[in-house]
Structure formats: structure tokens, C-alpha cells
Amino acid sequence: MSILWREDGQDLVEYALIFPLLILILLGILEFGILFFDYSTIANAAREGARAGILPATTACNLACRDAAALTAAQNAAAALHSTPTIAVTHPSAGTIQVTVTYNTSLITGPMIAAVGGSGAISLHSVATMRTE
């Protein structure tokens, strides 16, 4: 057999060509899982905050008291996140409360994305609006 037709290193070359693609797919799955968890957490925080803001208190509670309860409930529901989200409590119309949660999350692949000119962070945003009781 001729030296030109030997296939001794073929497996190694094929593995070297496929390995970066496999790593990229694995990192994509990890990134999606982390982003899904973060978004689910802030969506739940917005709902919990709005729900706490509409519940009538046992004592006389004014609008500021309900806003404080909504803010505290949203902060407690978002405690699993790596950093503190931005939480805003507003009243778009009479008899409603709106809780907005914004969270800036950095990606695992952020340095690689920044190397090609992108941003290594994503801003997640969730809003919950409920009518007061």
C-alpha cells in the first residue's frame, strides 16, 4: 500500500473538525436553559408582586402600603437570580397595579460574542398588570 493512501489519522482530523461544532451546540443548550430560568423567575416575580399589590390588607392600607407590599413580594420572588433586578410598581389606570421587572443577564459565551463585536448581555423584561380588589 502506498503512503499516499494511508488513513491512519483520519479519525483525529474528523474529530478536530466536528469538536468546535459540538462545543457550540452544548454552550447553546446551556445558554438557553439559563435564560429560560432567568425569564421564568422574573415573570413569576412580576406576577407575585402584582398579586401582593391587589390583595386587601387586614388593616387600613393606602396606595403606598400596597406598592411596598408589591415591591417586597417581587424582590422575594426574584431572590434566586444572580443579581438584583430592577422592579417598578406603577398604576396605569385607576384600580390597577402594574409591576415591571427588568433583569440584565450576562451570557456564558459573552466574551466570545464580544470578540466578534456583539454584546455579551441580554436584557429580560416582564410586566404583570392586575385589577385591585
Image (cartoon, rainbow, N blue to C red):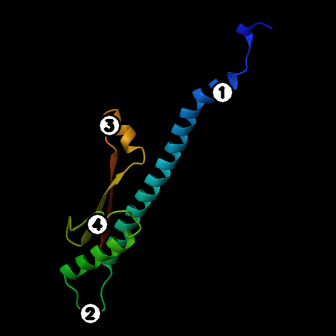
Give the secondary structure at mark 4: strand
Image quadrant in which you'd find residue 65: bottom left
Task: Say if residue 37 shows up in the picture.
Answer: yes
Q: Nearer the viewer, residue 26 or 131?
A: 26
Dot 3 and dot 1 residues touching (CB under 8 Å) = no
Task: Say if residue 132 shows up in the picture.
Answer: no
* Disc with the residue nearer the chain's start (1 vs 2): 1
* Disc with the residue nearer the chain's start (3 vs 4): 4
How far is mark 2 from mark 4, CA to CA?
23 Å
Q: Which residue is mark 3?
A: 118
* Disc with the residue nearer the chain's start (4 vs 1): 1
Q: Which residue is mark 4?
A: 99
Q: Which residue is mark 2?
A: 59
Q: Which residue is mark 1?
A: 12
Bin the neighbour count of mark 2 within 10 Å (Cα to Cα): few under 14, some 14-19, many 20 and up. Answer: few
Give the secondary structure at mark 3: loop
Residue most extreme to the front: 3
Residue most extreme to the bottom: 59
